Amino acid sequence: MVYLAAAILFVPLAKKMGLGAVLGYLLAGVIIGPSVTGFIGKEGEDIMHFAEFGVVMMLFLIGMELEPTLLWRLRSAILGLGGLQVLISSAAIAGLAMLLGVKLNAALAIGMIMSLSSTAIVLQTLNEKGWMSTAAGQSSFAVLLFQDIAVIPMLAIFPLLAVHAVQTEAAHSASIRDNLPAWGQTLVVLGAVATIVIGGRYLVKPIMHIIARTRVRELFTATALLMVVAIAVLMNLVGLSSALGAFLGGVVLANSEYRHELESDIEPFKGLLLGLFFIAVGASIDFSLIREEPWIIFGLVLGLMAVKALALFCLGKIFKLSTDQNLLFSLALCDIGEFAFVLLSLSEQSRILDDKMTGMLTAVVAISMAMTPLLMLFYEKLVQPRFTINETTEREQDQIEEHNPVIIAGFGRFGSITGRFLRANGVNCTILDMDSDRVDALHNLGIKVYYGDASRYDLLAAAGAEKAKVLIVAMDDYEKTTEVVKMVKRYFPHLQMLVRAKDSQDSFELMDLGVLHIYRETVDTSLRLGVDALNMLGMRAYHNHRAARTFLRQDELSLKSLSAARDNKKEFVSALKDRIAEMEQLISADKIKTWLDEGEGWDSSSIRDEVKGEPE
Amino acid sequence: MARVMIIFAHPALEKSRMHAHLVPMIRNMQGITFNDLYEKYPDLDIDISREQALLTKHDIILMQHPLYWYNAPAIIRQWQDLVLEHGWAYGHSGKALEGKYISNIISTGSQEKDYRQGARHGYPLDHFLLPFRQTAVLCRMNYISPYTIYGVHRKDKSDIVEEVQKLRSMLEVLKAPDFDLSTLDTVTNLNELIKAPVQTS
């Protein structure tokens, strides 16, 4: 209860302050932990073990999002970038540790432990900020994936580093493979992986089918959970990382038709457990240790993170990430991951590291994890805008020369079509985009695209907003869109805005902001598809064409009247209910029987009736 | 054997009485190209090269449409504007259509007696078709007075079936292997081609 209450209290608070949910959880953990208020004590560690399951679930979900083909496409990034990252970081950190007078085997262990990054925190944060699809996000993901895989050999190497080989038994007591000879161990591991792959391919579908037919929703959830738990247990049994197993299970199920069912069933559990995990991390920070030796600990944190960031930055350069994306990449991955806790406890058991060192390193890891969201925040608020200014002022000169009548903000899948169309018709556009890699790619194609955030006054001014006639707002990010609209309304009122909206909800808000030209992104395509369907059914093409035009007009009218009605309603009506009621009103508006016959002159029946009434 | 193409224009065939019955009959006929403009170009975006290629491949071109406001439906005008290009269809070097025969297949709501001086429409139907006639001249084509179905407003089901049969026999004459194109120079209009009117039971 304490956990939930803390989460409810701190997460919205952190979000309000723009810190992100992860930091909120961590903060909650620190506050309720033994060091500050002491609501929770030693049981925090048990909770940690329980909550680690959230990480397992997250990897299962990540696996499910990943189709094997995508995985294959990322293979060079995973192996190259990920492999080099682990190697270089491990070597660098181990070297430093040796310089500080740590023994070789311990230094190696520390190097390996500290080279890992936190999958949970980084992915969660990247998702939250919507950076997952950027080049940095993709690279980070590849590296994290490799690290998760790399944990397995590390688990195997650690006992070898141990001074007293006897101790290894303790670490692996749960695993059945220890009693087997080497080839048997390999066989067991392969067998387990094969079980997951084959089971996922051929067993899950019929089972899901049977369960789907019972139509009991809870059963579905139970099955999904059982599946994840079973995979985790199986993996533990053969001594592999359960997170990796879950990931594999997810990948196998990525093509299954029950994928979305499974996803939505596991999602809430994942969220809760992951939250718990973060709280536990926060709670496990031993402040007394920090108080005793603050300089050493913070020195270590900063030193480690600096070394990792440096290594990552060099790698990013080698793999041709642009500077700002590279910074995001290095900052995101320079923390130390949750696997470090597992590995640390293992190395303590194997006597590679002594108790004091372990305690200190645990604190270091926890602090570095807590720093990640802060670093991301730092990136978002300070680094990103700086690059926006830098890269645009560099090119300000030719923008002012250009004086294009049209500015396009956002050159993704939507804006690029509009932009190409205008270019094809000889209209020059000044194009602004937030994805620096896309900007560079387009530059190479000879298209002038400027990197930057269109919601910033100085950037739009540099892009020639004073002289332009039309601003096309075609960004993916709806919040940015509203920012741009508000800013333009205020500072460039002469600009005619054509604004992309995702759905009717967005359109309503844009209407409230006084935008006159709103384009819901899927309407035209859906109607075109509908027209083709009618054509295939053998209805007259010209009728269908006109019907679609009429429908569009009708729909926009309905939307406008709905928008007017909406303002009178209270805010707290359920959004979903609202949406359904809207849909109902729209559909009933479609039913007006005469909507296409109205005022149509061709072959009207009235003239026929009139003629028939006349004498021959 | 004369190659016959019908260029069909009806913006609301689903509401039509006469053409809805004529069209299936024509579509089922072998050896006649049926070019349904509104179906092909619902957005009036006419494919000029396709249309010109079709014209080149045919000897007799028949524009089939209802008469709206003493003219053809809008897409026929659009078609003329875009397809009959200068330098291709007319002008010094525009000889692509030279010697071809062109005419209309027209349905009117009113009866023939309404197309007379002093009657409701004031002039014979042929007068209203003057633009078609002169267009043909400019394109070095031969214009034949149209095949006309008068008084569609008053026609009942059996009348319509009869009209379908009549048009079929006219088209059969045109596409017959032994049909001599010069016959077209001798008739006053296409209706005349039907030698023995079809008997209705």
Image (cartoon, helix red, strand yellow):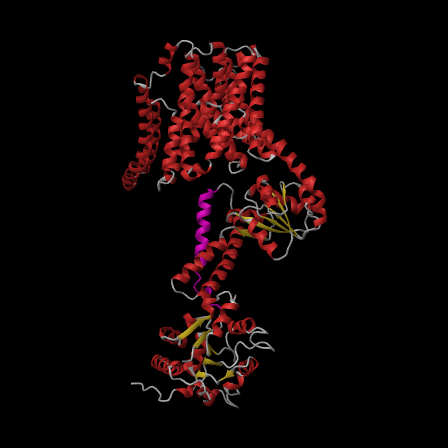
Magenta span: predominant SS is helix
Residue A530 seen in the figure: yes
Nearer the observer, A307 or A56: A307
Residue A8 seen in the figure: no
Picture quadrant of residue A299: top right
Instruction: Specify the segment rendered in magenta.
Output: A573-599
Q: Is residue A113 above or below residue B160?
A: above
Q: How many marks?
A: 0
Q: Is residue A209 above or below residue B197?
A: above
Which quadrant would the C terminus of chain A be assigned to in this image? bottom left
Picture quadrant of residue B155: bottom left
Picture quadrant of residue B190: bottom left
Residue A357 pos. (x, y %): 50, 11
Which quadrant would the N terminus of chain A be assigned to in this image? top left
Residue B45 pos. (x, y %): 52, 65
**In the drawing, does residue A220 fall left or right of residue A555?**
left
Residue A246 pos. (x, y %): 38, 30
The verdict on residue A142 being magenta is: no
Nearer the observer, A256 or A159: A159
Nearer the observer, B87 or A561: B87
Q: Is residue A87 above or below residue A288?
A: below
Residue drawn where x is 40% and y is 9% of the image? A164
**In the drawing, does residue A81 fall left or right of residue A66?**
right
The verdict on residue A577 being magenta is: yes
Nearer the observer, B174 or A495: B174
Residue A579 pos. (x, y %): 46, 47
Q: Is residue A508 above or below residue B20?
A: above
